[in-house]
Image (cartoon, rainbow, N blue to C red):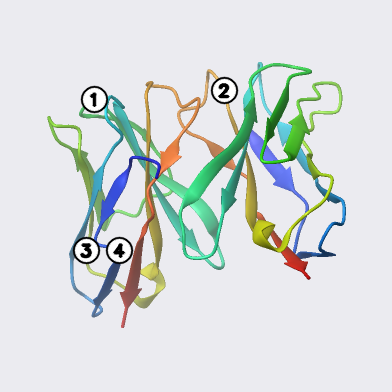
């Protein structure tokens, strides 16, 4: 079946550090891939997405590239800020999936 | 603002009781999804409705039920509540029948005491 695996958190970084949060997936066919972010006390917000292989999604300085050969969609940011502290969820959907399938989420804590 | 509205934001109730959570999807979206988020289980898909019909079912307990009305708003009914039902319940909406992107509401925090 379809599934998403994320690196476990929390990820703790100093401000301006480089961020990578790993995400790999298992899916039949050609899924669309997403990163959602959940700030404290809020709902999930779509951060970025990619719908086909080699696509790069980007938003607010975050990037992720759809890598079919490694079935990965790692989230990166060159310089994190304290305001990036949140929980990040990787997710997929595909033509044979009735719903978004989420990873377990990775908590990011950025300190000044 | 995602355009998805959930009410109430917070709910405190006793074990054995029944509650109803409400969701209004984004304008034009036909699909509504319900998710449960708890500390130990992560984000669990409960159920999906598309244009008034049940489309997919996930890990939804028999004590829980949902429906989508002709105006496309949806309600999630939780009955015979137990302490373990305490969680954040999210509604999300999407345009299509098969989910390619979802927009989430702010959630309803349910506390069962």
Q: Secondary structure at mark 1?
A: loop
Q: Let me know if marks 1 and 3 both belong to one chain.
A: yes
Query: How much space separates mark 1 and mark 4, taking CA atoms?
Result: 25 Å
Q: Which residue is mark 3?
A: B79
Query: How much space separates mark 2 and mark 4, taking CA atoms?
Result: 31 Å
Query: How much space separates mark 2 and mark 1, taking CA atoms?
Result: 20 Å
Q: What is the x, y in percent for residue B41?
A: 54, 61
Query: How much space separates mark 3 and mark 4, taking CA atoms?
Result: 18 Å
Q: Which residue is mark 2?
A: A94
Q: Which mark is residue A71?
A: none
In terms of sequence position, does the residue under pointer 1 or pointer 4 come before the other?
4
Q: Let me know if marks 2 and 1 both belong to one chain.
A: no
Please state the chain letter of the residue tagged with numbered disc 1 in the rendered image: B
Q: Secondary structure at mark 3?
A: loop
Q: Which residue is mark 4?
A: B9
- Image position of B43 with respect to A60: above or below: below
Q: How many marks?
A: 4
In terms of sequence position, does the residue under pointer 1 or pointer 3 come before the other?
1
* Foreground disc of the pair 2, 3: 2
Q: Secondary structure at mark 2?
A: loop
Q: Residue furthest left?
A: B70
Q: Are marks 1 and 3 in contact (CB under 8 Å)?
A: no
Q: What is the x, y in percent for residue A47?
A: 60, 40
Q: Residue furthest bottom?
A: B113
Q: Let me know if marks 2 and 3 both belong to one chain.
A: no
Query: How much space separates mark 1 and mark 3, taking CA atoms?
Result: 25 Å
């Amino acid at each position: 079946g379809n599934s998403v695996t994320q690196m476990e958190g929390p990820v703790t970084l100093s401000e301006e550090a480089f961020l990578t949060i790993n995400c790999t997936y298992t899916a039949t066919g050609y899924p669309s891939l997403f990163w959602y972010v959940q700030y404290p006390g809020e709902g999930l917000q779509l951060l970025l997405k990619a719908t086909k292989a080699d696509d790069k999604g980007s938003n607010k300085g975050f990037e992720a590239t759809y890598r079919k050969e490694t079935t990965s969609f790692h989230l990166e940011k060159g310089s994190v800020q304290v305001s990036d502290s949140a929980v990040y969820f990787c997710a997929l959907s595909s033509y044979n999936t009735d719903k978004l399938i989420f990873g377990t989420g990775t908590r990011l804590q950025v300190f000044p | 603002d995602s355009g998805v509205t959930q009410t109430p934001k917070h709910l405190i109730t006793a074990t054995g009781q029944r509650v109803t959570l409400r969701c209004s999807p984004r304008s034009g979206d036909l699909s509504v999804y319900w998710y449960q988020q708890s500390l130990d289980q992560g984000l669990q898909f409960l159920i999906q409705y598309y244009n008034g019909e049940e489309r997919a079912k996930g890990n939804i307990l028999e004590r829980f039920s949902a429906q989508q009305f002709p105006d496309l708003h949806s309600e999630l009914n939780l009955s015979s509540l137990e302490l373990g039902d305490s969680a954040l319940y999210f509604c999300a909406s999407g345009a299509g029948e098969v989910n390619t992107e979802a927009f989430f509401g702010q959630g309803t925090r349910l506390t069962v005491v």
